[in-house]
Image: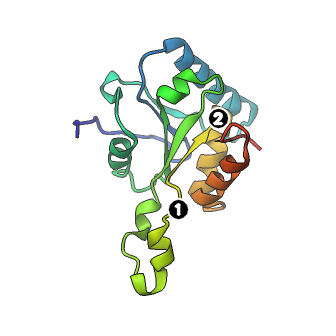
């Protein structure tokens, strides 16, 4: 696994967006603009915390989870990956940092959950990143609920409500 720089966030209410695909600067600017529009329209939203460092280029979801897990306050991290850059929707990959909470489950009581773990990732349009992040931080909604929402969307993404 590659050595990644530490992520230092000033605001726990800002969604963390890490750029892992550096092939399309124009697409990246579109993602940033959409995130900014949401924070502008909703004055209560914190601006997104953007990590735009070429050392993150090509990082896998698993590597990003390990790096982001150092921040115990985070419940989700968003990646601007190749799919984000190629799709007109610019869907970010949301990764559940709370999924490891299920590692020590007793098989006697939780075998079904062990055999079929809940989804750990879902695609989220940039306009919905603040909503997903905030609801997970507050524990208003569980990550699998967002995965269910994406499953019924024609494009397979979570959209802003």
Task: Name the spot of residue 145 as percent of width and height, x first.
Answer: 65, 58
Which residue is denoted by mark 2 in the rendering? 125
Q: What colour scheme governs how the chains and residues are painted in the rendered image of this protein?
A: rainbow
Quarter holding residue 107: bottom left
Q: Residue at x 67, y 47 (%)?
A: 150
Number of numbered discs present? 2
Residue 146 pos. (x, y %): 64, 53
Q: Position of residue 147 (x, y in %)?
A: 62, 52
User: Would you say 72 lies left or right of 4 here?
Assistant: right
> Residue at the location (53% across, 62% down)?
118
Q: Residue at x 34, y 29 (%)?
A: 56
Question: Which quadrant of the view contains residue 72?
Answer: bottom left
Element type where label 2 sits in the image: loop
- Quadrant housing residue 123: top right
Helix, strand or loop status at disc 1: loop
Identify the residue under disc 1: 118
């Amino acid at each position: 696994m590659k050595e990644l720089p530490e992520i230092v966030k000033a605001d726990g209410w800002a969604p963390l967006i890490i750029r892992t695909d550096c092939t399309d600067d124009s697409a990246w600017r579109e993602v940033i603009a959409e995130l900014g529009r949401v924070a502008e329209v909703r004055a209560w939203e914190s601006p997104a915390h953007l990590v735009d460092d070429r050392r993150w280029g090509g990082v896998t979801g698993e590597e990003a989870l390990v790096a982001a897990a150092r921040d115990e306050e985070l419940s989700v991290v968003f990646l601007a990956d190749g799919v984000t850059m190629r799709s007109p929707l610019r869907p970010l990959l949301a990764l559940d940092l709370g999924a490891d909470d299920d590692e020590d489950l007793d098989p006697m009581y939780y075998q079904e959950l062990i055999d079929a773990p809940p989804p750990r990732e879902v695609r989220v349009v940039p306009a919905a990143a603040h909503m997903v992040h905030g609801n997970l931080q507050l524990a208003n909604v569980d990550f699998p609920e967002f995965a269910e929402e994406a499953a019924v969307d024609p494009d397979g993404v979570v959209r802003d409500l």
